[in-house]
Each structure stands twice: as C-alpha cells, then as structure tokens.
Image (cartoon, rainbow, N blue to C red):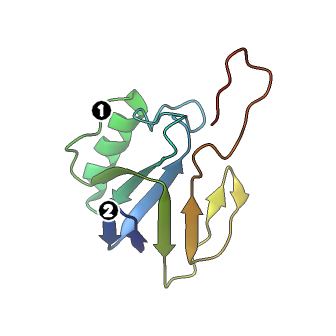
Amino acid sequence: MKVKSENAIFDGDMYLMLIFNGQMAGNFKFAYKAEIQDGLLDVIIIKAGMIKDIIALFIKMLRGDHLEDTSGLIYFKSNKIEVYCDEDIVTDIDGERGPDFPLVIECIKGGMEVLGLKDEIKL
C-alpha cells in the first residue's frame, strides 16, 4: 500500500487503515484527536508486523489509550489523502463496499452547513 498526503507518506505493508471524520468507529473512540471543525481527516495505519505486537496494539486502542509513539502504528491528520494498492483489496465505507483503488479522499472545511443551531457553525 502507498498512502500520500501533505503531512505523511507511507509505502509498505499494513493490516488496517482507518480514516475518520469524527472520533468514533462503532462504540470505540479510536480517533481521540479528531476535531469536527478542523477540516482534517484523522488517519490511523496499523503496519504489518508480529501478530503478538498487533494484538497488544488492538487492546491498547480498544481501551482508548493514547497512541503517540506506539510501535507499529501511524496516526496523522490531513485534508487530502491518496491511497494506492496493486492488490485486489476491497475497501469499506461504514460496512458497505467502497470504491476501487486508487482512492483520493478529501475533507472540505466548511463544506457543510448545519441548520437549526442557535449559533451559526460551519462543519
């Protein structure tokens, strides 16, 4: 897999990549640094490695522990991400089949206006 953004480049094997526009996936707060109004996506890459290390990493994530300086994991923010893969891997968007590679995923700051709030907020 190859992942490119203005803040990070990853080129290698991974078990999982999660891209958030909020903090939660299911009932788990994985992207604890995410801010709804910052116009950035939070990206978590779990690099391929030893199974025993990955199990410990998933336990740490499920407990909601901080992920800074965690071996086997990359966490960064970006408004635009490009993802390339030469293998026939299926992408997933909230449990539904996603598009084929290559992917370009972008967060547009202020791209959605929420109506009905007392104070005007652009998300």
Camera-nearest label, 2 or 1: 2
Residue, x 55% and y 37% (percent of image)?
22
In the picture, which quadrant includes the C terminus?
top right
Residue topped by disc 2: 8
Q: Amino acid at mark 1?
A: His
In the figure, 106 relative to 2: above or below?
above
In the picture, which quadrant includes the N terminus?
bottom left
* Left or right side of 63 for 20: right
* Left or right side of 44 for 106: right
Query: Mark 2 or mark 1, which has the lower sequence index?
Result: 2
Residue topped by disc 1: 66
Closest to the observer, 114 or 17: 114
In the figure, 79 relative to 37: above or below?
below
Q: Amino acid at mark 2?
A: Ala
In the figure, 1 relative to 14: above or below?
below
**SS type, badge 2:** loop
| x and y percentages locating residue 21 in the rendered image | 56, 44
Residue, x 26% and y 55% (percent of image)?
72
Residue, x 44% and y 38% (percent of image)?
31
In the figure, 113 relative to 97: above or below?
above
Residue, x 24% and y 40% (percent of image)?
68
**SS type, badge 1:** loop
The circle on residue 108 is none
Q: How many marks overall?
A: 2
Name the image quarter holding residue 50: bottom left
* Left or right side of 33 for 108: right
| x and y percentages locating residue 119 in the rendered image | 67, 18
Q: Name the residue furthest front.
A: 120
